[in-house]
Amino acid sequence: MSAEGTAADCGPPSAVEQTLAVTRGVRRLLAGLGYASIAEATLANGRRADVLAVGPAGEVVIVEVKVSVADLRGDRKWPDYEPFCDRFFFAVPPEFPNELVPTDPGLIVADAYEGTILREAPTHTLTAARRKAMLLRFGLTAAGRLHRLEDPQA
C-alpha cells in the first residue's frame, strides 16, 4: 500500500466533501441543461447561495445543497433566496431521506458525477430590475474569479 492510502482507508466523507460532491453533480446537471453556474455566490441580502446559475434566456436558478438532516432541519433561511431567482431547488445526496425536504422548492439528487431533477421548482418570475441586478452580480463574480485564476498576483 502506498503512503497516501486509498479512499476506502479514510472512512466516510466529511460534510464538506459531501457538499463539494453534490455541488459538482448539480453544476454538471445544470451545464447539461444549458446553464452557466458559480458556487457560493453572495446575494444582495447577504445570504450565500450554494449554486447560482443563469440559463440561456437569462433565467436565474439558485440551488441550496443539504447533506445532513440536521443541516436541513436547522435551515430556516431558504425562503430568503426565492426573491433572487426564478426557480429555487434543494439538492441532496442519493442516500438522503427525500421525504424530509420541504415540498415547495424543487428537488435535485446529485453525487459527484451527475444530478437528476426529482421535482421541478415552481417559477417565480423576477422583476426586470432584480433580473438585471442578478445578471450583473453573476457576471462580475464569475469574471472576478476567472481573473484571479489567470493573474493571481493582480
Image: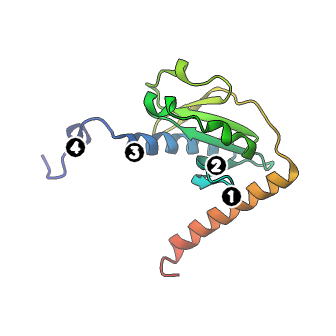
Q: Position of residue 154 (x, y in %)?
A: 53, 81
Residue that carries the numbered disc 3 in the rendered image:
16
Q: Amino acid at mark 3?
A: Val
Q: Is residue 67 above or below residue 3?
A: above
Tag 2 and tag 1, C-beta contact below 8 Å: yes
Going by the picture, which residue comes out furthest to the bottom?
A: 154
In the structure shown, which secondary structural element does the residue marked by tag 3 occupy? helix
Q: CA distance from mark 3 to mark 4?
A: 19 Å
Query: Residue sitting at 45 percent across and 42 percent down?
Result: 19
Q: For residue 87, which numbered disc appears in the image?
A: none
In the structure shown, which secondary structural element does the residue marked by tag 2 occupy? strand
> In the rendered view, does 124 fall on the left or right side of 99?
right
Is residue 29 visible in the rendered image? The answer is no
Is residue 54 visible in the rendered image? The answer is yes
Q: Amino acid at mark 4?
A: Thr
- N-term mark: 4 or 1: 4
Q: CA distance from mark 2 to mark 1?
A: 8 Å
Residue that carries the numbered disc 1 in the rendered image:
138
Q: Position of residue 105 (x, y in %)?
A: 67, 29
Going by the picture, which residue comes out furthest to the right?
A: 128
For mark 4, does the 10 Å Cα neighbourhood hold few (<14), some (14 to 19), or many (20 or more) residues?
A: few
In the structure shown, which secondary structural element does the residue marked by tag 4 occupy? loop
Query: Residue sitting at 53 percent across and 74 percent down?
Result: 150
Q: For residue 6, which numbered disc appears in the image?
A: 4
Which tag is nearer the camera, tag 4 or tag 1? 1
Residue that carries the numbered disc 2 in the rendered image:
52
Q: Amino acid at mark 2?
A: Leu
Query: Residue sitting at 69 percent across and 28 percent down?
Result: 120
Tag 3 and tag 4, C-beta contact below 8 Å: no
